[in-house]
Image (cartoon, helix red, strand yellow):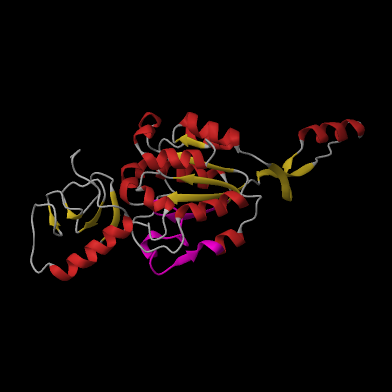
Amino acid sequence: MEEIKALGGLDKLIDRVKALMKEQKERHEGGSKWIGTGGISPFGAYGYNPEGIRIGQNESRHRKAVKVWDKRNFVNLRDDIALDTRNMKMALRKLRVLTREGLAEELDLNATIKKTSDNAGMLDLKMVPKKRNHVKVLLLLDIGGSMDDHIALCSRLFSAAKYEFKNIDSYYFHNCIYENLWMDNTRRESSLVATYDVLHKYNKDYKVIIVGDASMSIYEIMNKYGSVEHYNLESGITWMNRFKAQFTDMVWLNPTPKNHWRFTESIGHLQRFMDDRMFPLTLEGIEDAVGVL
């Protein structure tokens, strides 16, 4: 494997697979050149190459594909899971901006005692609106691919966040943020939301929490056309910088164990981009992220 050399970058990979699509006329298995299965070719399924285009494979194996040419179906995270979310709720609860709004329906005990005393013991009930957490949260969730390994954990976080924050909106993305996001994975191809619309909708008062394993080809972050699923006209880092410029309060929660981060180039790159505001998706990590926010 150490002797296998990358073909020379994303553009050369795309040009080469276009040429092979014209030349190849039959199924191929093994080898190092054609689109096929097994072997060390950069193109196809169930083989190994440090930098290739995955075609016709059910799931990720080495996390090294720079393009994936398949119909991919993602599943929405559940927001109704109660099991094991209590500690997450307690950690998120520290992110509070409490204000009183609405109908006066909660007893103000101190004011009631004072007024009753002033009235020589005649009961005088004083009511106030309930305190509500009015912090505003924008939750951006990586879904699909290597994130399938973390669905249960991310669903618990999603449930806790939806319970704890009344002003919360969430959007999905895959691997890196590009020109479109979506709110429903079952209809993601027909109900895309322009990322510019999201940036225009939410002001700097929102606190942004990005959840993802940050594990991808570096092309997906740095290159035009680098997305694993489509030809993006602007790089992922360009869109990330737009979020960073608009939202001063932004953190990243990573479900990959922190002691594994050093083995993935893209995690290190995004950790530096976030100015070390990337935290592991653990109770301690959530508490640290909330402290920063």
Give the left or right position of residue 128, taking residue 90 as reference: right
**Residue 64 image point, x, y percent:** 28, 47
Residues 144 and 52: in front is 52
Q: Residue at x 32, y 46 (%)?
A: 146
How many numbered marks have been drawn onto this rendered protein structure?
A: 0
Q: Is residue 105 visible in this depiction of the protein?
A: no
**Residue 107 image point, x, y percent:** 74, 39
* For residue 172, above or below residue 156: below
Residues 30 and 290: in front is 30
- Quarter of the image where one finds residue 121: top right
Residues 62 and 158: in front is 62
**Residue 16 image point, x, y percent:** 23, 62
- Quarter of the image where one finds residue 211: top left
Residues 250 and 172: in front is 250
Residue 60 lies in the magenta stretch = no
Residue 184 lies in the magenta stretch = yes
* For residue 199, above or below residue 292: below
**Residue 104 image point, x, y percent:** 75, 48
Give the left or right position of residue 76, taking residue 272 as reference: left
In this picture, which residue range is highlighted in magenta? Answer: 168-196
Q: Is residue 206 visible in this depiction of the protein?
A: yes
Q: Residue at x 56, y 54 (%)?
A: 242
Q: Residue at x 17, y 65 (%)?
A: 20
Quarter containing the N terminus: top left
Quarter containing the C terminus: top right
Give the left or right position of residue 147, taking residue 26 as reference: right
Q: Residue at x 77, y 37 (%)?
A: 108
